[in-house]
Image (cartoon, grey):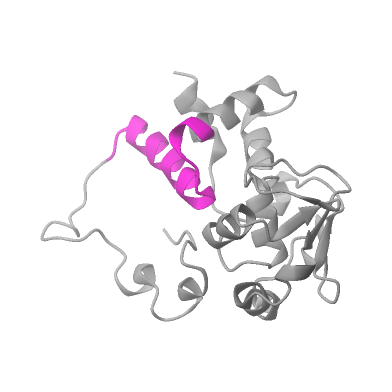
Amino acid sequence: MKLFLKGDRCYSDKCAIDRRNYPPGQHGQGRSKQSEYAIQLREKQKVKWMYGLLENQFRGTFQQADRMKGITGTNLLVLLERRLDNVIYRLGFANSRNQARHLVRHRHFQVNGRKVDIPSYQIRLGDTIAVREKSRQVAAIVEALEAVARRGVPGWLELDKAQFSGAVKAYPQREDLTMPIQEQLIVELYSK
């Protein structure tokens, strides 16, 4: 499945999933029936890779979502979308979540006027994310902002390209997340 981990490469003809959509090796094209556990585990691993999290980080986020009111699976996706590295990727300041994580760790961004270098920082309603004054000439950020028209900015975020800033208008809803994620499988896996 196409996870868009490589940024622009996933939009071009060089994408590995488009060229060869099966596992490598002599037996890669064989069919095998997967168990229910394997399907649930694969879904969890897919979401972990999409957001660039390790197992303990993901489990902690799931436990936090489980403690919240509402549907656990939806809460999990909302918490993952509210991470600072993901919001920067969604605003178009980076071409991939991995690049956004790297830029956050190098202190290129401010949240409400304060430097933040923690990629897992949870963005709140009304927060303003801006590129620091010194970092506005960074080639990776400038190139990503030029390519933002192709990917687009979600409706729950607002981008001001001229000011190198963005704002959180609302929390993301399940309908806003268009990625092919079956969060119920993750909840079933962790509830065993």
Q: Is residue 40 left or right of residue 109?
A: left
Q: Main secondary structure of the magenta part?
A: helix
| Residue 10, image x, y percentages | 47, 71
Residue in the picture at 66% in, 49% down: 117
Residue in the picture at 89% in, 48% down: 126
| Residue 45, image x, y percentages | 42, 42
Start-end of magenta stretch: 34-57
Using the rendered image of the protein, determine whether residue 85 is visible from the camera's viewpoint. Answer: yes
Task: State whether residue 107 is above or below residue 14.
Answer: above
| Residue 168, image x, y percentages | 83, 52
- Residue situated in front as seen by the camera: 37 or 49: 49
Task: State whether residue 188 is above or below residue 82.
Answer: above
| Residue 71, image x, y percentages | 68, 29
Task: State whether residue 103 is above or below residue 81.
Answer: below
Residue 38 is inside the magenta segment: yes
Residue 68 is inside the magenta segment: no
Dividing the image into 4 quarters, which one contains the N terminus? Answer: bottom left
Which quarter of the figure has residue 129? bottom right
Q: Is residue 109 left or right of residue 28?
A: right
- Residue situated in front as seen by the camera: 8 or 31: 8
Q: Is residue 66 left or right of residue 23?
A: right
Residue in the picture at 73% in, 58% down: 109
